[in-house]
Image (cartoon, rainbow, N blue to C red):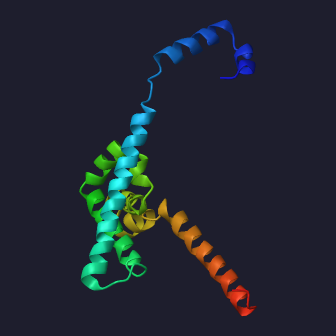
Amino acid sequence: MSNNQKKQLTPVQQEYQKLQNQREIKRPVVKNCIKAFLTGGLICLIGQCISDFYIYYFNFTEQTAGNPTVGTLIFITMLLTGFGVYDRMAQFGGAGTAVPVTGFGNAVISPAIEHRTEGFVLGVGGNMFKLAGAVILFGVFSAFVIALIKTILIQRGGL
């Protein structure tokens, strides 16, 4: 709290602020960052192994193996979320599970599971893309704008 705000507090409020600061639980920031880094790194390592699997066994190139790898990771995340495993991983890893593409898969399936009692259309269908819908919308829109700019530049001989 800034000094200007402290000056406006009554003595009782200032005393309460001191008491609150003394009793506030200290968060282990460094420990949480390390756990998030390791969890996110493990997810990325699994993704790299899946990509290498597609390259080795299905003769994909590095460029073409990306799409099935992402799809596989999202599918695995949705299965793990359905069985409750991904939530436990998220409790441990924090932001490390939200940053990779697996966080997107979790964001899609969690509301669907939560609202399944309301039916398939209004419950699952209506709530599935509440959080992930914005990501999909802005991702598609951004891709459209970039493709439009690239097309205009190619037409004019810029690229």
- Residue at left offset 53%, top offset 64%: 135
Left or right: where does residue 26 sit relative to residue 87?
right
Residue most extreme to the top: 11
Q: Is residue 54 above or below residue 137?
A: below
Can residue 64 be seen from the camera position used here?
yes
- Residue at left offset 45%, top offset 25%: 26
Instruction: From the top left corner, tell me how far across and down residue 115 is, in percent.
Output: 36, 58
Which quadrant does the C terminus fall into? Answer: bottom right
Residue 79 image-quadrant placement: bottom left
Q: Is residue 68 above or below residue 6?
A: below
Q: Is residue 48 above or below residue 66?
A: above
Which quadrant does the N terminus fall into? Answer: top right
Residue 16 image-quadrant placement: top right
- Residue at left offset 35%, top offset 50%: 39
- Is 16 in front, or is 56? 56
Instruction: From the top left corner, tell me how far across and down residue 99 is, in percent.
Output: 45, 55
Left or right: where does residue 90 sit relative to residue 83?
right
**How many numbered circles are shown?**
0
Instruction: From the top left corner, tell me how far across and down residue 29 is, in percent.
Output: 45, 34
- Is 147 in front, or is 134? 147
- Residue at left offset 41%, top offset 66%: 122
Can residue 78 be seen from the camera position used here?
no
Instruction: From the top left corner, tell me how far across and down residue 3 is, in percent.
Output: 72, 18
Left or right: where does residue 150 sit relative to residue 30?
right
